[in-house]
Amino acid sequence: MLLAVAMATAVDPSHDLASERSSIESTYELTKYLEYQLKEIKDVYLTYLGPPFNEKDFSPPRPNSTALTLPSAATRLELWHGLENQARLAQNQKAYSVLLAAVRELASSTLCPSLKTSLLHFCTGLDGLLGSISALMTTLGYTLPPQSANMRTNAGELKVEGFWILRELQSWLWRSAKDFNRLKRRLRG
Amino acid sequence: GLVKTLQPGAQSGKLSISINCLPLISVSSRPLPDVAIIYPQDPVLRMGSNLTASCWVHPDLGVHASSLFWTLNGQQLPSSFYRVLSPTNLSVTLAGLNASRQTSGDNLVCHNHKGHILAGSCLYVGMPPQKPVNLTCWSRNTKDLTCSWAPGGKGETNISTQYRLKYKLRWYGTEKQCEDYTHTQPYSCSITQDLHLFTPYEIWVEASNQLGRATSDVITLDILDVVTTDPPSGVTVSRVGQLEDQLSVRWEAPPALKDFLFQAKYQIRYRLEDSQDWKVMDDVGNQTSCRLAGLRPGTVYFVQVRCNPVGIYGSRKAGIWSEWSHPTAASTPHSERLMSCDSKSSGDSNSTLRRELKQFFGWVRKHAYGCSSMSMKLYDQWRVLMQKSHKARNQVGKHR
């Protein structure tokens, strides 16, 4: 029985991978698009926060709550290179699931209605990205990591968190494009 | 990355501070006591009031209050505003606060001597709302009721202020709230469900923020008294044969009219292409065509039409004028007569004629022999002569 199953999966691996590769390609396109969208929203959001948040080279300390739950995109080159497909996807999945919840909270606490609408619209794109990644993981037979919740704080810390969430999101979108590129190449071989 | 450890003498654990130039450093993974706190946190204040805020730093930080400084919206506050309350507590006093620069709050931040952020607090400075004003409502084709208003005072818009449009049927009690606030037009809301005709509505706006609340005057209206419609469609402007001073305008009544109207009245306005002054034709009545006369030849005109639903269900009252239709343009035919290259500088046609006559009389005095030789033929000959010499003059001008 097991042998039959093994034979069945071994019969047409190239076909499955082709559809996987095309799904990775469209996920890659989505990250590029979101990266572009984020640039515009980030400028508007930082202006909404007011100075010094919208000043060049401004960088507040990374808040504890975000540091606890959000994995940083920054990683050493050899570690990133050597990531197995499952781990690579799992890191992306974890990051975007935390980021999506964080941006949603950001949107709900935004007092400017048009900015709130823009952020919520951006969230639908982010949700799509997360869905693509999760679907890819399921198709490749990987298990999805569990969710975790974020804590809320006062207005001043909220601003710093917002600043960092968008900064990390920018780093992740930039990194994910390279992750998906790498995945595509690894699945070809 | 760097994690600074504390001065000798620190007891419980390490307090880490990340450094501005290396943002992606991980902070200690254990939950930490607050490094510093500003009091008050996120206060809501009236414009012009004073505020004394204090920055308390954790004693384990080993930092003296006198080495700290404050910034407000990125600008450093003068040290003359500071007071050292204790070795771990520095206060700042701000007098006569201006309204908040952004609705997310003014950023009041406490820094250490190197400029690193220790703590922050958002100041929300504004005014309690005043009675909202200019409340006007209109109904589009009796299918909805849209109202708009304006904030009653200054300063209420600097902090987050909610406006709620409320209404009730005067004779049937229950107060309701408008839900559909359009973000494209601020201070506007549409009621789209459950509209009753033939009965008066009472409508008002309630404004509230953290400093107070205010209610506008109540307006009473019957939906049928404030009906407007879409602008006329299919507006076309065309020449009237060869007539050089006329244009014919045609349009179609907006489709909704047949649902509830007996009549509509229209208004046309037109202007020269490069002018901002509109000329309005008021007495168009209920026809769907009109002729514009007294226009300048060889000129482009922009034309718009709008509609007013009159006599809704037999009432004598007029409704509310629709928006103007999209501008349509057309040009009058060129004049057969002398075409001056200086057409822009020739002002009103009357003065051109006078000038021409003056020139003609001058020429006649010189060249004609008595009034008996005066005739239209002479006038026409003179015109031809003028055209020839004018052309010659302009040719010269071109080759200069």
Image: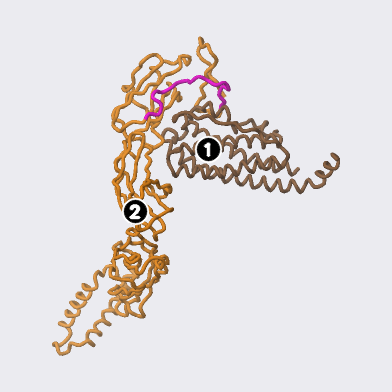
Chain colours: A brown, B orange
Apparent side of residue A83 relative to residue B398 in the rendered image (left or right): right
Judge by depth and name the residue closer to the eye, A152 or B279.
A152
The disc at residue A103 is 1
| Labels 2, 1: one chain | no
| Outermost residue to the front | B172
Spot the residue most to the top. B9
Give the vertical position of B78 relative to B316 (above or below): above
Q: Quadrant of residue B79?
A: top left
- Name the quarter where the N terminus of chain B is drawn: top right
Q: Nearer the viewer, residue B368 or A6?
A: A6
Q: x%, y% of residue B154?
A: 30, 40
Question: Residues in magenta?
Answer: B25-43
Chain letter for mark 2, please: B
Tell me if mark 1 has few (under 14), some (14-19) or many (20+) residues whose alpha carbon lies within 10 angstroms of its own: many
In the image, residue B37 lies in the stretch drawn in magenta: yes
Q: Is residue B350 above or below residue B139?
A: below
Which residue was labeled with disc 2?
Answer: B137
Left or right relative to B335: residue B259: right
Prevailing secondary structure of the magenta residues: loop
Amino acid type assigned to the residue bearing label 2 in the image: Cys
